Image: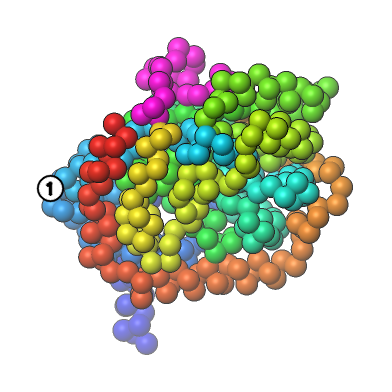
Amino acid sequence: MHLSLLSILALIALLSTHTQAAFPDKSAWCLRGGCTDPPAALVADTLAQEAKIYGTAAATCGDGICNVVAGEHCLTCPSDCGVCGLTAPVVRCVNPKHAALTFDDGPGPATAGMLKALDALKVKGTFFVVGEVVMQNPDLYSVMKGAADNGHEIGLHTYTHRSLGSTGRMDPPVTNSKEMTPIEVRAEAVFTDLAVQYAIGLRPRFLRLPFLEYTDKSIAVLDTLGYVPLSINVDTNDWQVAELAGGTTAMIMTNFNTELPAALGSGIIVLQHDVYALSSTAIPQIVKTLQDAGYTLVTVSTCLGVPAYRNATDPPLFASRFDGPTGKLASLVDHVNATLTNTTTNNPIGAGDVTQIKTPPTNVTTNTDNTGSNGGYTNNDNKETGGTVKGASLASSSAASSNQWSAAGAAAAAIAPIAAFAAAIK
């Protein structure tokens, strides 16, 4: 019994040593304070996996290990991490006749109504969730799981909805905002990843940038970690309309129809927010307008030709940098910002920042869903089901760490060359 206690204390000490290295203290990146953690078991599992791969030594560029825990990425150490494959977020679908409807900031009480509206039209959407909102709303896990089971897709929208641009700002504003470090960007992504795994047993690849803002560094970190950063080319600005006392569906459609002409002729990614019930009323008109223009409505995975979730055999700490079971994604060449001119803006988001919207959306996470029957997506439907999903995801994580990968394999995936892909998009 004495030896067991010593063993437990040693494990706690090891995890404590790696906690700060792997995930910085929350006070450094959870600027509002009091952030809810992802499940402790999943965090501990991740830390244990990292200890096997990286050990305790500091990052050394040239040692053959892409030490993301210590902040290494494809810009700072291409010899270990590989050449950066993406220099900007994806903004359009590969196929010029595909359009993807995407929804940010959930899950929330209005999410079920959005899903009902999409299902009535036999259209699938992609929902980018905020990690902390997921952890604070276990009653919505059944909605998320039902969406995924019915062919809709779940993506990441960071953990606290902080900008990945040069200011690291939030909305409502905080006085202590600052640009995030690479390990803070990683915490925002991975914590959200773990929250979704806990809720529905899946680990998404796609990450929608809060406020659609980024820097070269934040894109490099996401690229190194294997996430696909996403932006848009058609913004409904539904959040602005929904926050007006007299906001209407017609106003949302005016915004949509104003933005659409510039995107016609290319693949389209549309932005709405599933925290506003009003926005669901515009879905039928948006779908009809796009279909009348010859577009097929698809999910983001079909839009990009990229799997929405990590393959079961992918290393747990990377999405394989597009190598391995998912194959190299040369199709991204057609729509990455290598073919889109970006300009530095002079708005208050910060010097050196890049954005593709004029006024960013707020991070509203509550609303009243007055859409009526939820069409099978229930906010409080059998909470025990959520427990089953969570248990499965924890078991899946354990199996992945013990049977489906090795430390050497993960390190190899981290440094797998993607020269052909990188050269193609430049």
Residue, far bottom: 1
Q: Quadrant of the N terminus?
A: bottom left
What residue is pinned by disc 1?
A: 62
Locate residue 352, reporting x and y percent: 37, 20
* 3 up-or-down from 19: above or below: below
Whether residue 185 is in magenta: the answer is no
Would residue 217 be visible to someone looking at this image? Answer: no
- In the displayed structure image, the side of residue 204 where residue 117 appears, left or right: right
Q: Residue at x 48, y 32 (%)?
A: 91
Q: How crowded is mark 1: few (under 14 residues within 10 Å), some or many (20 or more)?
A: few
The percent coordinates of residue 173 (x first, y second) are 56, 26
* Residue visible at 44% across and 15% down in the picture: 345
Viewer-closest of 90 and 268: 268
Tell me the quarter of the picture where residue 282 sits: top right
Residues drawn in magenta: 337-360
Residue 402 visible at all? yes
What secondary structure do most residues of the magenta stretch adopt? loop
